[in-house]
Every structure is written in C-alpha cells, then in structure tokens.
Image (tube, rainbow, N blue to C red):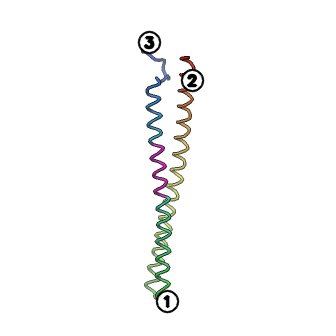
Amino acid sequence: MSGSEMVEGERSPQPLQREQQDLADELASVRREREQSENYLLQMSDGMRQLEEAAAGGDPKDYFVQKRLAGFRDLESGLRRITMQRLEFLDEEEREMRARLEENEQRLRTERQEKS
C-alpha cells in the first residue's frame, strides 16, 4: 500500500479540517436561525399586545372588532406553536452538530498524536 492510500474508514486531516469548518459554519447558521425565530416570537407578542390595546380603546362589545381579535389570537397561537416546534428542531440540530464537532476534534487529536 502506498503512502497516499488510506485504510477504509480513515480520513486525512485535510478533509476532517474542512468538515470541521463546514460544521462550524452550519452551527453558526443554526444559531442565526434560532435568533431570528426568537425575534419573530417577540415581534408576534408585541404585535398581539398592540392589537389588544387598540381593541380595548374601541367599543368592547363591537362584534367585528372582537371577531377580528379572536382571529388574530388564533393565528398568533398557531404561528407561535410552529415557531416553538422550529426552535425545538434547531436545538436538536445544534446538539447533533456539536456532537459531530466533538467527534471530529477527537479524531484530529488522535491523528496528531499518532504522527508525533
């Protein structure tokens, strides 16, 4: 076997380092998505609060105002649920990426020790 051939399952340091960088980039992307989702939740809450304040300033018995407000509450509730599910998914994705990063870091340390 020549020096350039590798045993099956082994990875050279270069691809591992590239994979580490790719994982770090993906992790940063997941964090940005998480931040955007959290900001979206805050904006939804603020928007709903403003709608409720506006409705409170009018006739509380106005059927159409109350009907619209109920519709907005339902919409906000559904969007909040979807956003929370997305946040859970992003949390799981982040945990998996961190585990892969840790695994690759261990491989790199092992390879460096073997070369020493």
Indicate the secondary structure of the residue bearing disc 2.
helix
Question: Where in the figure is residue 25, as x and y percent of width and height?
Answer: 44, 41
Q: At which x and y percent is residue 112?
A: 54, 22
In the image, the segment drawn in magenta is 26-37
Q: Inspect the image, locate mark 3, and give the three-letter code of the amino acid beneath it.
A: Gly
Q: Which mark is residue 3?
A: 3
Residue drawn 51% across and 45% down? 93
Which amino acid is tagged 1? Answer: Lys
Residue marked by disc 1: 61
* Distance from Cα at disc 2 to Cα at disc 3: 19 Å
Residue 80, position as x, y percentages in the image? 50, 64
Disc 2 marks which residue? 110
Q: Residues within 10 Å of mark 2 (few under 14, many from 20)?
A: few
Q: Of callouts 2 and 1, which one flags the residue occurring earlier in the amino acid sequence?
A: 1
Q: Are marks 1 and 3 in contact (CB under 8 Å)?
A: no
In this rendered view, identify the residue nearer to me: 115 or 96: 115
